[in-house]
Amino acid sequence: MKPPSLPDLAVLDAEGITHVWRNACPHTGGPLAPPGVLPLSRDGEHLVCQTHGALFRISDGFCVAGPCAGAWLTPAQPSPDGAAAPR
Ligand code: FES
């Protein structure tokens, strides 16, 4: 039986564009963060995997550092109301 998936991660980039990513790290397939946590870097430019610290650009999901550097997050659909977590 497949475990329930975690909610997608919706975040606004510096230009105010909403990006939505599956909460799954390409390194192991595990979650980037537990439910209810938006794992932003201190500068607000990247999502940070809470397991091994990989950094993903918010704008395109590309991994710029960490054990899966060069990999990509999987895009997801925005919620019907267009909601995104604040930065
Ligand atoms: S599980 Fe995300 S960096 Fe290892």
Image: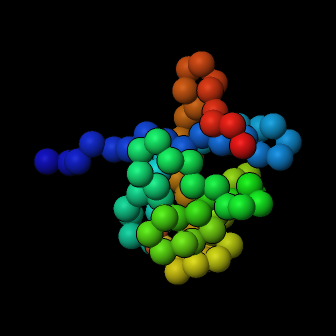
The residue drawn where x is 57% and y is 71% is 54
**36 relative position to 5: left or right:** right
The residue drawn where x is 55% and y is 34% is 77
| Residue 50, horizontal then vertical, whole percent | 48, 64
Q: Quadrant of residue 28?
A: bottom left
Which residue, as the protein is rendered here, is positioned at the far front? 42
Which residue, as the protein is rendered here, is positioned at the far bottom? 67
Instruction: Say if 52 sits above or below 24 in the image.
Output: below
Instruction: Say if 41 sits above or below 6 in the image.
Output: below
The residue drawn where x is 63% and y is 36% is 85
- The figure's colour scheme reads rainbow
Quarter that holds the C terminus: top right
Which residue, as the protein is rendered here, is positioned at the far top? 81
The reply to whether residue 78 is visible in this rendering is yes
Q: Quadrant of residue 24?
A: bottom left
Q: Looking at the image, which is closer to me, 32 or 19?
A: 32
| Residue 55, horizontal then vertical, whole percent | 63, 68
